[in-house]
Amino acid sequence: MITSQGFGKICKFSDLTPLRQTKDNVNGSKLSYLLGTNCTLRTQTSLSAFTSYRVGGEAEWYVSPRDLESLQASIDYAQENDLRITVLGAGSNLLVSDRGIPGLVIATRHLRSKHFNPATGQLTVSAGETIPALAWDAAALGWEGLEWAVGIPGTVGGAVVMNAGAHNSCVANMLVSAQVLSPDGTLATLTPEELGYTYRSSLLQGGKQIVTQATFQLQPGADPLAVTARTKEHKKHRLSTQPYSYPSCGSVFRNPKPYTAGWLIEQTGLKGYQLGGAQVAQLHANFIVNRGGAKANDIFSLIRHIQHEVQERWSIWLEPEVKMLGEFSPIV
Ligand SMILES: Cc1cc2nc3c(=O)[nH]c(=O)nc-3n(C[C@H](O)[C@H](O)[C@H](O)COP(=O)(O)OP(=O)(O)OC[C@H]3O[C@@H](n4cnc5c(N)ncnc54)[C@H](O)[C@@H]3O)c2cc1C
């Protein structure tokens, strides 16, 4: 039922189970809340502001719960109304179709809390906390272990699901456990072994469970200035080697060992190649950037074009790392 690529039936408000409704004090419009919660249910919500590509259509239904009860109420609501669920973190590894996403989009961005435990050196955080903010917080405390992650603009939930990584480190190496919520309301605490981690992948990508919280092992007791300096170094390196000034999703393709996707794309002569507003970045060929006004379909079409060109030249089919949601119609 929970999916990252779902299609359910299209519903109107009147088809759905009753909601509590009030008037918005600001503009007088009607607000609908999931029963028993203060969580608003919105309809036809544009997702372009919630993805790092800054493209994509609307969520048919959209909630952004602030606590576990509201999250569970969101799942219950989707089940009662036969709506597919799509989970959205910071949207930094997503390409959402221009036609939008049917069903209920659950955004985790408001699931917030963090606790640094000096006795254990463990950091326990809710799914919606952002990775760069945690890296800076840890550095300011003199806790080592997250310096590598400062350039990854996702949430904790997305990082756990994707096994996010950089500079030879990744989530799998430092995760103690992840708390996940199943559609039946069961909360389970899973170890990295149970999550079946491989390169940029985990069993959670099957889409059955929602990550609610994670605990990471860090090393407290270092000099905050030194950890902050290293974190800054990582950020600086990122800014000089990757195109952070245009909207993107980071690396588009997985690296097909022993090659890197960026090298293959560059050798195929595709750096700077542009379709609509989508361009293969000059600075890093495994990035597709939105040069302004790109449609999701431009990006999708460019992904297909790269795959075909690289296949023709190297007999290698590049597998996307970016998750594509909804329907696309490639123009090439
Ligand atoms: C400029 C830039 C640089 C990047 N650099 C790196 C890098 O160095 N290394 C790297 O690994 N990645 C990198 N990325 C990609 C991206 O930031 C990571 O994949 C990140 O972990 C995605 O987190 P998110 O919260 O944005 O997840 P989203 O993009 O919102 O979602 C990704 C997937 O996880 C699922 N998901 C999200 N949250 C949850 C949850 N709580 N429970 C269950 N499922 C969930 C979604 O359904 C989706 O399938 C980069 C992206 C950008 C834009």
Image: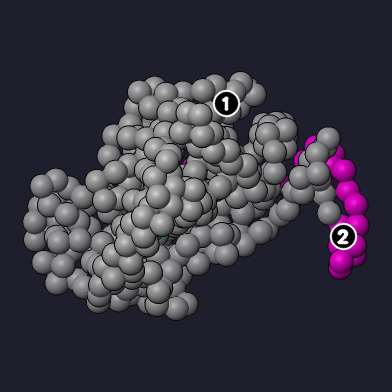
SS at circle 1:
loop
Query: What is the magenta range?
Result: 3-30
Query: Please, is residue 280 above or below residue 76 in the view?
Result: below
Residue 258 percent coordinates (x, y): 10, 47
Residue 150's mark? Answer: none
Viewer-proximal residue among 142 and 71? 142
Query: Please, is residue 285 above or below residue 218 in the view?
Result: below
**Which residue is painted at 70% across and 38% down in the image?**
67
Residue 113 percent coordinates (x, y): 62, 42
Residue 126 percent coordinates (x, y): 58, 39
Q: Quadrant of the C terminus?
A: bottom left
**Which residue is painted at 29% across and 34% down in the image?**
198
State the residue position of label 2. Answer: 24
Amino acid identity at mark 1:
Ser
Asked if the residue under mark 1 is in contact with the one under mark 2, i.e. CB atoms within 8 Å, the reply is no
- Whether residue 287 is visible here, answered yes or no, is no
Residue 16 forms part of the magenta stretch: yes
User: Magenta segment, principal secondary structure?
Assistant: loop
Amino acid identity at mark 2:
Asp
Q: How is the image coloured?
A: one colour
Q: Which class describes the residues within 10 Å of circle 1: few (<14), some (14-19), or many (20+)?
A: some
- Whether residue 294 is visible here, answered yes or no, is yes
Q: Earlier in the sequence, mark 2 or mark 1?
A: 2
Residue 182's mark? Answer: 1
